[in-house]
Amino acid sequence: MAEKNQTIVICMGSSCFSRGNKKLVQMIQDYLKENHLEDEVILKGAHCMARCDKGPVMKVNDELVCNITEETLLDLLEQKLGLGSR
């Protein structure tokens, strides 16, 4: 099995959750599966990332990303996970 060298941490605090993170989590899981990245990327949740006014929020590797929407998520994942350079 390949070493997981990238991490996505998505805020699951009540504010981000109420702004749509449940759907975003499913989209991320689907994206990782469709692109065969399950063995390369760790996906986990965080209780609160203290950016409630800018949610939904997640960290890709160590970079904080705010105001994520269903419309921007897939492009964001491609940029941050480096798929454009594959």
Image: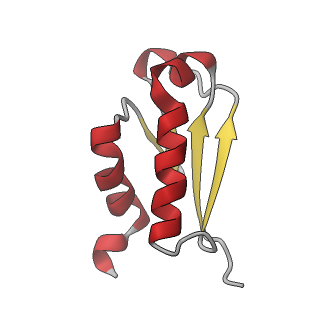
- Residue 14 spot, x, y in % from top left: 61, 17
Q: Is residue 86 left or right of residue 22?
A: left
Q: Is residue 57 left or right of residue 46?
A: left
In this figure, which colouring scheme has been used for the structure?
Answer: secondary structure
At horizontal 45% and vertical 24% (from top left) the residue drawn is 55
At horizontal 30% and vertical 78% (from top left) the residue drawn is 85
- Residue 77 spot, x, y in % from top left: 39, 56
Quadrant for the C terminus in the image: bottom left
Quadrant for the N terminus in the image: bottom right
- Residue 84 spot, x, y in % from top left: 28, 72
- Residue 82 spot, x, y in % from top left: 38, 69
At horizontal 51% and vertical 64% (from top left) the residue drawn is 32
Q: Up-down: is 21 above or below 84?
A: above
Asked if residue 28 shows in the view, the reply is: yes
Q: Up-down: is 78 above or below 22?
A: below
Q: Quadrant of residue 40?
A: bottom right
Closer-to-camera residue (28/67): 28
At horizontal 54% and vertical 50% (from top left) the residue drawn is 62
